[in-house]
Each structure stands twice: as structure tokens, then as C-alpha cells.
Image: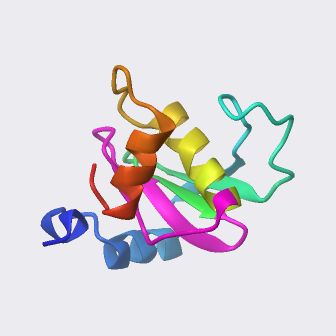
Amino acid sequence: MKTQQMNAYNFQTIAKEARKGRHEYVELKPVYDGRKSFYDKANVLEFENGLKILVSYTTYVAAVLPDGRFLSFGNWSATTRRHQWDFYKQYGRQVAGATLDDFETAMQFNLY
């Protein structure tokens, strides 16, 4: 069973919320990646209720729920995974001792 099916915030719910327009659209600035910029290719939709959605290029690829848990919407390119990694580190629940491999494993299986 996929974990996102066990959560009220599934992809359809998130897409529906995004269409309502109650959000702020901000560029994701790299903090943990080491790059100077993602060149406006990674953006975050921030909702009033605390939900945050990562948009890589023009695709919804991940979300951080209001309680800090994260969801991944599929398996993406190396560049998009870099966006996801920085997004999760900035907005997600802090996990002591987490490594990039831990996050990539979690993303691969939609675990949070």
C-alpha cells in the first residue's frame, strides 16, 4: 500500500487545492545543495494551511504536509531530485542523521 494513499493529502487533493489559488508562489533558493541558484526551475507553492508543493520546471513533484511529513510524486531526474532534496531539508521535518540516500530511498517508495 502506498503511503500517500493512507494520507488525506493525496495528489488529487493537492492539485485541487493548487487550482483554488490560495497560495504564494516563491522561488526555491538552494541552501543545502551548494549551487548558487536553481535558475527559477524550482519553485514552491506555499498554502495558508502550511502545505507546501515543490514545482520542478512545470511539474508538481513533491509536497511537505503541514505537520512536516513529505510526499514524492514519482521518480524523477537527478536535477529534480536535487530540487527535492533541498526542498525537504528546508521545509520538511528534521530527521537526525538523515543522508541523501535516506531521502532518495524514501522518495523512491513514497515513504515519509
Task: Note whether 55 is above or below 44 in the view shown.
Answer: below
Left or right of 56 on screen, residue 49: left
**Which stretch is magenta?**
56-78
| Quarter location, residue 109 | bottom left
Q: Would you place residue 33 above or below residue 16 in this image?
A: above
Residue located at (35% from left, 32% from top): 93
Q: How far across and down, in percent of the image, does residue 19 sit?
A: 51, 76
Q: Is residue 39 at all visible to an observer of this figure?
A: yes
Residue at coordinates 40% horizontally, 57% vertically from top-left? Answer: 107
Image check: 74 left or right of 2? right
Colouring method of the image: rainbow
Residue 38 image offset from top left, x and y in percent:
80, 48
Q: Residue at x 20, y 70 (%)?
A: 2
Q: Is residue 39 left or right of residue 92?
A: right
| Side (left or right) of 112 relative to 51 | left
Residue 47 image offset from top left, x and y in percent: 47, 52
Task: Report the front residue among 76 and 72.
Answer: 76
Point out the residue furthest to the front here: 101
Reply yes or no: does residue 12 show up in magenta: no
Query: x, y percentage for residue 79?
Result: 70, 58
Q: The N terminus appears in which quarter of the rendering?
A: bottom left
